[in-house]
Image (cartoon, grey):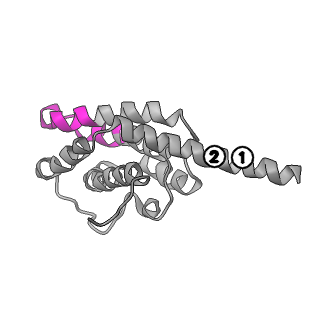
Amino acid sequence: MRILTLLALCAILCCSQGREQEECLKENIRLPMIKEMQKAFPEIHKSLPKDTKASKRILGKLKKCSKNIADFKQLLDIYDEHVFQKLWKNHPHQIPGVFMDSFRTLRNVMDRCVNRGPQTPSRCARETLKKMKKLTQDDLPKAVSEFQNVLLWISLTMDRGRSHKKI
C-alpha cells in the first residue's frame, strides 16, 4: 500500500512539473513573436540554396513523439550551434536580424523554463537529436525549413492548457 501511494505521488509530481514548464512558456513567450518568426521564413528560404534532398526528413520520428520542454531546449541549442551558425558562417549579411533576436529570446526562455521540471530529453527525441548534430552542409536548408515544425510544437505546448471552446 505504501509503495502504491509513493508511486502515485511520484506520478503527480512529474505531471505537475511538466505543467509548470508549460505555464512558464505561456508566461514568457509572446505568441506574436512565434508568428513573426514564422513570417520570416519566406525571406529566409529565398537566401538559402535549393533543397536537393526534398524527400529527406531531418526531424523524422520526432513528429510522432510526445515532446517535453527539455526536448525543445535541446532542439534550439542544436539549431543554433549546428544549423544557423553553420549556414550563415560565411554569409553573416544574410542573417535575418529580427528572426535571430526572437530565436535568442526563445532560447533564453527555454533555459529558464526547463529548470521547472524534467530536464532530460524524452527517449524518442534522443535519437533524432543525435542525428541532428551530424548534419552536413547539404542538409542545412532542409533543417531550416523544418524549423517551422519546432515553432509549431512550441506554440501547441504553450496552448495545451487553454480551453478550446467554439464561440
Q: Is residue 91 left or right of residue 152?
A: left
Q: Is residue 48 visible?
A: no
Residue 14 appears at what percent x and percent y?
A: 63, 46
Residue 103 appears at what percent x and percent y?
A: 28, 37
Q: Residue furthest front?
A: 167
* Magenta span: 80-102
Indicate whether residue 112 is drawn in magenta: no
- The kind of residue on which mark 2 rests is Cys
The structure residue drawn at horizontal position 46% and vertical position 65%, both measured from the top left corner, is 64
**Which element type, helix, strand or loop, lies under badge 1?**
helix
Near-viewer residue (79 or 72):
72
**Which element type, helix, strand or loop, lies under badge 2?**
helix
Residue 8 appears at what percent x and percent y?
A: 74, 52
**Residue that badge 2 annotates:** 14
Near-viewer residue (114 or 87):
114
Q: Give the numbered dot on residue 10.
A: 1
- The kind of residue on which mark 1 rests is Cys
On the rendered image, what quadrant is the N terminus found in?
bottom right
- The chief SS type of the magenta part is helix
Cα–Cα span, label 1 and label 2:
6 Å
Position above or below: 109 against 122: above
The structure residue drawn at horizontal position 51% and vertical position 54%, both measured from the top left corner, is 125
The structure residue drawn at horizontal position 50% and vertical position 49%, both measured from the top left corner, is 68
Q: Is residue 18 left or right of residue 139?
A: right
